[in-house]
């Protein structure tokens, strides 16, 4: 008693008919590069400077390097991405996070996002250094600034 028995022939296993989307509703997708042109150039510099010592990664989600410990239900702030990160080759721990900002980061919404990301990284004990695309960012300068932040 209390159990319900369903015979196989009582279950409709045929796939449901899916309505076709009209062209107005149809979605279209296309692959794209994971980085802008400026990011690609900067990434190549990072690799040439640091690849012997660190694993250099791009478009790193905060959620892959930061664990939320508070009891708040949502962690959508960790869905933001950092432009680059250097990881220890032995432990795979993040050593430093790197942002490359263009003029869009001067806008209010982007500034709020950047402040929030910096606060989250600081709370997690991760160092973050910012570079700007409107500077030349020669390899010697990049190396010097990154190492200064690592050694703080």
Image (tube, helix red, strand yellow):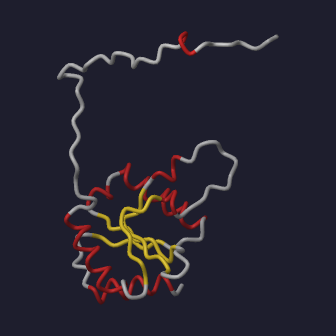
The relative height of residue 152 versus residue 29 in the rendered view (above or below) is below
Q: Quadrant of residue 2?
A: top right
Q: Position of residue 6 (x, y in %)?
A: 63, 13
Residue located at (49% from left, 59% from top) = 62
Q: Residue at x 46, y 18 (%)?
A: 13
> Which residue appears farthest toward the right when viewing the image?
1
Above or below, 14 against 121 in this view is above
Instruction: Name the quadrant of the N terminus.
Output: top right
Q: Position of residue 28 (x, y in %)?
A: 21, 35
Q: Quadrant of the C terminus?
A: bottom right
Query: Is residue 39 left or right of 128 when viewed as pictured?
Result: left
* Residue depicted at 53% across the width and 82% down the height: 90
In-image side of 37 versus 62 (left or right): left
Dividing the picture into quarters, in which one does residue 101 lie?
Answer: bottom left
Q: Nearer the viewer, residue 23 or 13?
A: 13
Q: Please state if 52 lies on the left or on the right of 133 as rendered.
A: right
Image x and y of residue 30, in percent: 21, 45
Image mark count: 0
Residue at image point 47% right, 51% down: 79
User: x, y percentage for residue 136?
Assistant: 22, 78
Residue furthest to the left in view is 23
Q: Is residue 79 left or right of residue 100?
A: right
Taking depth in this image into account, of 141 and 56 the one nearest to the observer is 56
Vertical comparison of 17 with 97: above or below? above
């Amino acid at each position: 008693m209390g159990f319900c028995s369903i015979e196989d022939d009582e279950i409709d296993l045929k796939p449901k008919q899916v309505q076709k989307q009209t062209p107005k509703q149809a979605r279209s997708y296309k692959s794209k590069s994971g980085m802008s042109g400026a990011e690609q150039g900067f990434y190549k510099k990072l690799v040439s400077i640091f690849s012997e010592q660190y694993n250099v990664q791009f478009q790193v989600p905060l959620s892959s390097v930061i664990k939320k410990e508070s009891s708040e239900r949502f962690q959508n702030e960790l869905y933001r991405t950092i432009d680059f990160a250097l990881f220890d080759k032995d432990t795979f721990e993040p050593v430093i996070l790197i942002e490359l900002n263009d003029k869009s980061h001067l806008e209010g919404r982007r500034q709020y996002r950047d402040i929030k990301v910096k606060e989250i990284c600081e709370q997690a004990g991760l160092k973050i250094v910012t570079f700007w695309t409107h500077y030349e960012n020669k390899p010697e300068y990049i190396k010097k600034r990154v190492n200064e932040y690592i050694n703080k």
